[in-house]
Every structure is written in structure tokens, then in C-alpha cells.
Amino acid sequence: MKNAYQRKKQPELVRRQLLDVAARLSLEQGIAAVTLDAVSQAAGVSKGGLLHHFPNKLALLDGLFDELVARFDRSIEEAMAADDVEKGRFTRAYLTVCFALDREAEAQGWQVLTVALLAEPHLKARWRDWVAWRAAEFPATDSSPNCLLARFAADGVWLADLMQSHDIDASTRAALLQKLKALSLE
Amino acid sequence: MKNAYQRKKQPELVRRQLLDVAARLSLEQGIAAVTLDAVSQAAGVSKGGLLHHFPNKLALLDGLFDELVARFDRSIEEAMAADDVEKGRFTRAYLTVCFALDREAEAQGWQVLTVALLAEPHLKARWRDWVAWRAAEFPATDSSPNCLLARFAADGVWLADLMQSHDIDASTRAALLQKLKALSLE
DNA sequence: ATAAAGATACCGTCTGGACGGTTTGTCAAG
DNA sequence: CTTGACAAACCGTCCAGACGGTATCTTTAT
């Protein structure tokens, strides 16, 4: 990616690249490694170029966050569409997506999200909004204690994945998922 | 705490003070506010003095982390001592402590821990060690899928507390705890 | 018992570098 | 020829850590 003056201009592609790099950096070296210099350099763009797309660092993190939440939300939407039982549908979708996170190539993206989430109070609020929004959307079908419990457990598994602190084997994992899905139907 | 040359030397006390201040700072103003200058000044110690006790910043965070984990571990130990059923004892203790975290005055300390945990890959590994150690200690009594599930759910609740993303009301919370404890006995 | 000889517990300043952000310049496409 | 997409140099600030010093504590030798 040399000589940006000559190369074709592809703002969307560069933007993507910047976000991807930011995600990768924070995953591999921690959120502190996400600096404007590091991100821009690793993306093969000058710092000025980075700041052209994102006016400041917060905007960069926001962009990253938005993209990740959007992807997460879309995955849930898909999982819900494939489920024709109404009761606990959202919870099961949530479970499915959370449990699938470690398999996906994009898993790293969500790891970044978590870190950023906890580190930045500003993003914490945005996540809260998403949760509140989704919770308000399915009060009748997914507000039972069992569903709540299942979703909390999913968060726990997700956290464990993030920390690589448990290394649950696949069969246990599958059994867990099944058990939680059953809970959402009770 | 003026004139450290005259005052009596109390290395342990100063060390504690530094850790406490670091915890308080990160709680009130975010982890970014934990700078050597800020910590040392707020603790009434010079930067040189701080660096005498902790050779670098990472050592300071490590110290903070160690203390918090030790406290957490002690709480679990206590809870286990008060439980005379062997099966799932560790899991119930874990549940109790996690659910109590939002009530405690020290809850804030653990919030700091979590953030640091996720932000610093280095500390992530240390937490992993703790989990592995504890898991290895109770393989017979606490390795059942149900126990695992219960602990994951506790992590989820803890995360929710940390994010203030759910605002579970007290009665639901209590019911959840009871349900999970029952799970540890099955 | 005491004085010398370290060792330990600090203080206060300085520096080198990192980092977020700005500004000015350059090229290419419409 | 204007605007959007970058580059490159630069600025002010902040911060970790180094350094050289000073005061107090502990041990040892006498």
C-alpha cells in the first residue's frame, strides 16, 4: 500500500481497514496499544489520513463500536428469524450468537468490543442503551427469570471465551447451550 | 503527611496507602487517571517514593490486582467455611461472593479490577491462573455442568452490575441466587 | 554500649519519548 | 477548478522512569 497519491482512492476500504486494524491491535496488545500512530501506521495510512476519516480518537472507537454492535444485532436478527417458537425467542437467539462467538473469525472483533466497553464509560452507556432497547422490545416473551438467567450465563461464557480462562471442551459447551435453551422454554 | 524526612518510616503503611489511592483514582476518574504523578501526589508521597515501592507502573497495577484477588479469594474461603455440604461448595461460595459484590463498599474495587483485567493482557493471564488453580482444587465437587453453568451465570450478573446495564431488582436477584444455588446441589 | 557502616525509605528534578491533535501541502477525480 | 482523500511535518502536553540526593533504620565491630 505504498504511494497513496498514486493509488486509487477507496475511502470506504481505507475506513474499513482502519477499523480492522484498530480491532486487531487492541486484541493483541491491549486497548492501550490503540494509538493514532499505531493504527494509522499498521493500516498503511498516515495519521492525517486516519484523522480525515475519524476526527478524533473517540470517533474511531465509536465507529468500531457501532460496527460491532450492528453486526451483533444482525446476527441476533437472523437467529430469531430461524426460530418459530415465540416464547424465549430472543433469548435463544442471544444464546446462539454468544456461544458461536468463539468459532467465528470475527470473534476477535467482539473481544475488542468488550474491552472498549468496560474501559470507556462513554461506550458503556451506549451498550446499556442497546440492552435496554432490546429488553423493551420483547417484554412478553423474554422477561422471565429463566430467560434472564440464561442470558446471564451466556454472558459468562462469553466472558470466559474472552479471557480464555476456562477452555470449555466442545461437548460440555454444547450441553450447556442445550440446557440454557431448554430454560428459555420453561 | 508532611515532611517525610522527619516522620516515622512506615513502609507497609505507605505501600497500602499507594494501593488504596490507585484504586480510588481508577474508580473515580477511570483507569487513565492512574498515573504515577497522580497516585504519588494523592498519597502524599513523592514520585520517587512511589517508584521505590513499585519499580514501575506495571508493578503497581500488579500489586493492586494481587490485593484484590487475595480479598476475593478470602471472601470465598469464608463463604466455604460456612457451608457444610461438600457438593458444589465452591460454586455456592462463588455465587454468594459475586452476588454480594454490588452491595459491598468495596464493590468499586472489583470494578476497577475487571476493567484492568480486560484491558491488560498481562493481568488477564494472572486471572486465568487463579481460575485454573481454583478449578483444579475442587474437581470432584464443583466440576459438574450445573456448577459450571451457575458460575457462568454469576459472572454474567457480575458483568451486568459492572455495566449497570440491567438494574435487576432485589427480589429477582434473590430468586436468581437461590435458583443457582439449587443448581449446584443437583 | 556505642560508633561506624551500610541498608532502607524516602525526596525533588529532569528528560526523553509518546500521543492526540493541527496545519499545510499534494494529488486525483468529478 | 473545486472538492475530497490523503501525506508529512509539527506542536503542546503529559507521563514513565532515571537520577542524585537525604534522612532514618539496622547491623556489626569494637
Image (cartoon, coloured by chain):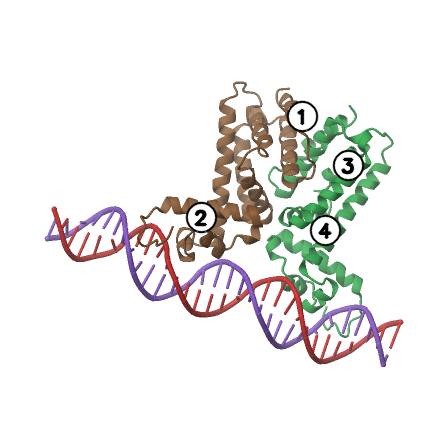
Chain colours: A green, B brown, C red, D purple
Tag 2 and tag 1, C-beta contact below 8 Å: no
Residue B131 position (above or below residue B119) = above
**For the residue carrying disc 2, how many other residues have a C-alpha within 10 Å: few (<14), some (14-19), or many (20+)?**
many
Q: Nearer the viewer, mark 1 or mark 3?
A: 1
The answer to whether marks 3 and 4 sit on the same chain is yes
Q: CA distance from mark 2 to mark 3?
A: 42 Å
Q: Is residue B134 visible?
A: yes
Q: Which residue is mark 4?
A: A65
Residues at circles 3 and 4 in contact by the CB criterion of under 8 Å: no
* Disc 4, SS: helix
B127 versus C2 height, above or below: above
Q: Amino acid at mark 3?
A: Ala
Precedes in sequence: disc 3 or disc 4: 4
Q: Label 4: few (<14), some or many (≥20) within 10 Å? A: many
Of the pair D24 and B92, the residue shown nearer to us: D24
Residue under label 2, please give it: B18
Query: In the rendering, at what x and y percent does residue B167 appear?
Result: 68, 35
* Gap in angstroms between the C-alphas marked 2 and 1: 38 Å
Q: Position of residue A144 (x, y in %)?
A: 76, 27
Q: CA distance from mark 1 to mark 3?
A: 19 Å
Name the subunit of mark 1.
B
Residue pointed to by mark 1: B171
Marks 1 and 4 sit apart, C-alpha to C-alpha, by: 33 Å
In the rendered structure, the answer to whether residue A154 lies left or right of residue A82 reads: left
Taking depth in this image into account, of A156 and D22 the one nearest to the observer is: D22
Q: Amino acid at mark 1?
A: Ser
Nearer mark to the viewer, of 1 and 4: 1
Query: Would residue A103 be seen by someone viewing this image from the given angle?
Result: no
Does dot 1 land on a helix, a strand or a loop?
helix
Taking the spot 74% from the left edge, 63% from the top edge, the residue there is A53
Q: Marks 3 and 1: in contact by CB < 8 Å?
A: no
